[in-house]
Image: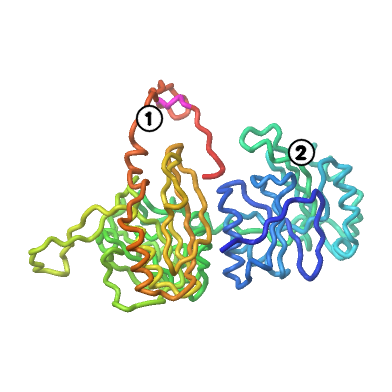
Amino acid sequence: MRGAEVLRNPGRVLRNEGGSSWYMCYFLHRLLDFRVPDVESVISMLGYTLDLVQWQLPHGNEPFSPFWYLRLPNIELPRLIADRAMLTKGFMEVWGEGSTWEELQESIEACPAAIKDPWLKEDIKFKIVIETYGWKLGDENHKDCIQKLQFIPFQGSVDLKHADVKMWLILCKTSDNSGIPDTVPDRMYFGREVSCSDRSRVDAYALKKRRYIGPTSMDTEMAFIMANMGKVQKGNMVLDPYAGTGSILVAAAAFGAQVMGADIDVRVIKVGKLDDQGQQLDVYSNFQQYSLTPRLAGLLRMDVHMHSLRPGLEEAFHAIIGDPPYGVRAGGRKSMPKPGIEIRNRENHIIATAPYTLGECLRDLLDLAARLLVVGGRLVYFFPSAPETYREDEIPAHPALQLVYNVEQILTTRYSRRLIVMEKAEKYDAKKASDHHLSLGEPMLSIDRLHDQVYEQRPGKECTPSVFDKKSNDYQDSTKRFRSKLV
């Protein structure tokens, strides 16, 4: 399965034609590889095929740039996408762009009157927002920029609080910024805001404000991105087989889905922990905090390797989203009852467990998804990788599932994780699945040694001296570190 077509930038503003419209999709400068799949998944969730959509690379054909162009078949789509996509700032109808003020003015004047005139009328109150990318603009320069736009014949009055239309002037200058690749060309853009993303969801559900979290709780923004990749929407049934503290479940429920969680550790599901005031906290506490309790269908003490779901149960979920244990902070375990042990109290009995390799874990996960997903439903999970061992052919496959996205998030110099998105393409066939597993043999992956690769000292790597930091009043590692926007 492929994404939408991506065109090279022709060096000019593309105008609307044939009933579809071109918009600038203004991205956030973070999680760069996730941005396009996030938007495409939202478009698919809204019921549009990606054959109707086209991307155009930013000016200079630099994919790291946040100024992509997107051709959409419906004028309502920019608003609907901005409401869900997690990595966009908004969409803009571009009137002109250029590398100099002269080029910008020439491009704006060349914009068809049919596009501009409805927003230049006397009864239209307007506002101009100046956005800088890669640098900061002083107050004096701000006024100069407004003066340079005097050639645009606005007839209406300026209203900063209740404008009928918001115009954007974006000034991109990256040549002096060490945090942005110098391959992103300097450029100026001017146009009308079509839709603006609301990022308040990330803050409202932030982990630092959540009552019940743990060391492996999924980052809030990433949890919402995973829900988008799974095309989660109101009325869906969503399963997280590795629920833990329920971060992914909360994100899916916030989008209107009915959710069900499972975890092999009964303490996480049933016991939880005590807060500073001695109150009992568990997954239900998080759902109560956000008034989402009616959307939590249930929690199961369940092991994907030896699950307790009804035999023959198929096509019960629209999405299965989870973060399998891969042995860095939490190692994988599977149920392994000891022979000859008499269970006297089933209510309190905790079954014995054994080590669970990632290869075996993912084989069980894909087979579970192939059974339980509806056709067209999606499986979304993280797959660990390391530069020394990653091989694309090791990404697990299944006859009933089709790979949609494989997106890398760099975590450290030693390892990263890849968000794998698969879609169920056909009904589950037990014989075909069994033959597939037999042909592959033992499900071993090179990444099964990830824990050792992460924590072992590299040959020839010397410890760097600590230096006293006055701000933190403590000693800090003197090694310089730079945060990549791919993380």
For image coordinates 80% across by 37% down, the residue present is 140
Q: Is residue 74 above or below residue 383?
A: below
x, y percentage for residue 380?
46, 61
Amino acid type of disc 2?
A: Asp
Q: Give the range drawn in magenta.
A: 475-479
Tell which residue pokes out farthest to the bottom in this image: 312
User: Which is nearer the eye, 123 or 74?
Assistant: 74
Crowd around label 2: few <14 · some 14–19 · many ≥20 (10 Å): few
Give the numbered dot on residue 139.
2
Residue 267 left/right relative to 453: left
Residue 176 in the figure: left or right of residue 419: right
Residue 478: within the magenta? yes
In-front residue for pair 190/437: 437
State the quadrant of the N terminus.
bottom right
Q: What residue type is labelled 1?
A: Arg
Q: Nearer the viewer, mark 2 or mark 1?
A: 1
Q: Which residue has dot 1 on it?
A: 458
Q: The residue tagged with tag 1: helix, strand or loop? A: loop
Residue 122's place in the image compared with 445, above or below, is below
Please identify the dominant SS of the magenta region.
strand
Is 138 magenta? The answer is no
Q: How crowded is mark 1: few (under 14 residues within 10 Å), some or many (20 or more)?
A: few
Q: Which residue is drawn at 37% across and 54% down?
A: 213
Give the image location of residue 363, x and y in percent. Answer: 35, 60
Q: Which of marks 2 and 1 is nearer the N terminus?
A: 2
